[in-house]
């Protein structure tokens, strides 16, 4: 027997969950993390071209832009799990060392708070777990 939701938000969430199960039973076990595997990590050269200083020679490089993106995602409370993990994956490809990623997130604790920093660090660690390469980059 299912528990009756206590507030309107829980009730809407339960209703949406039931609707998703009715439309497609496979959605009950859907994991957004599995969906991330469909998005490959861009090669460093492509990131530099699209997001780096290829067009604006005096502008920020791709690594710096991605570090700023990670800082912004942390400031939002690190609520966008997929975005944080993908940004970390792209940062590693762009040449960021693990220390630089951790420092960027840690610096945001002053502005976003310890819970946001902790969540972002957990997501970053999750993204770097399969990272066998050292920090020589």
Image (tube, rainbow, N blue to C red):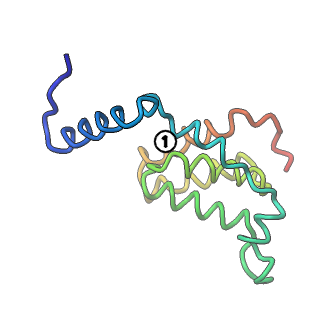
Element marked by disc 1: helix
Q: How many marks?
A: 1
The answer to whether residue 18 is left or right of residue 64 is left
Q: In front here: 102 or 86?
A: 86
Would you say 67 lies left or right of 80 here?
A: right
The front one of 11 and 131 is: 11
Up-down: is 80 above or below 67?
above
- Give the class, few, some or many, for how many residues have Cα within 10 Å of label 1's Cα (few <14, many ≥20): some
Displayed quadrant of residue 19? top left
What is the x, y in percent for residue 94?
Answer: 77, 57
Q: Residue at x 43, y 46 (%)?
A: 114
* Residue 92 x, y percent position in the rendering: 75, 50
Q: Residue furthest top?
A: 1
Q: Is residue 8 left or right of residue 106?
A: left
Residue beneath disc 1: 118
For image coordinates 63% across by 50% down, the residue present is 86
Q: Residue furthest front?
A: 23
Query: Measured from the top left, where is residue 111 in percent x and y?
Result: 44, 59
| Residue 119 placement (x, y as % from top left) | 48, 42
Q: Quadrant of residue 8?
A: top left
Residue at image position (20%, 44%) is 9
Which residue is found at the position 77% from the left and 76% from the top? 53
Residue situated in front as seen by the camera: 86 or 38: 38
> Eyeballing the image, is 65 above or below 1?
below
Quadrant where the N terminus sits is: top left
């Amino acid at each position: 027997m299912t528990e009756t939701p206590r507030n309107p938000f829980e009730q809407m969430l339960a209703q949406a969950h039931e609707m998703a199960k009715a439309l497609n039973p496979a959605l009950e076990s859907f994991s957004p993390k599995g969906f991330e595997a469909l998005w490959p990590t861009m090669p460093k050269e492509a990131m530099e071209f699209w997001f780096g200083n290829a067009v604006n020679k005096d502008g920020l490089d791709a690594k710096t832009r991605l570090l700023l993106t990670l800082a912004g995602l942390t400031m939002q409370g690190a609520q966008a799990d997929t975005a944080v993990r993908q940004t970390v994956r792209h940062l590693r490809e762009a040449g960021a060392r693990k220390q630089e990623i951790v420092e960027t997130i840690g610096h945001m604790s002053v502005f976003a708070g310890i819970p946001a920093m902790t969540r972002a660090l957990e997501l970053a660690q999750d993204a770097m777990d399969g990272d066998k390469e050292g920090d020589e980059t």
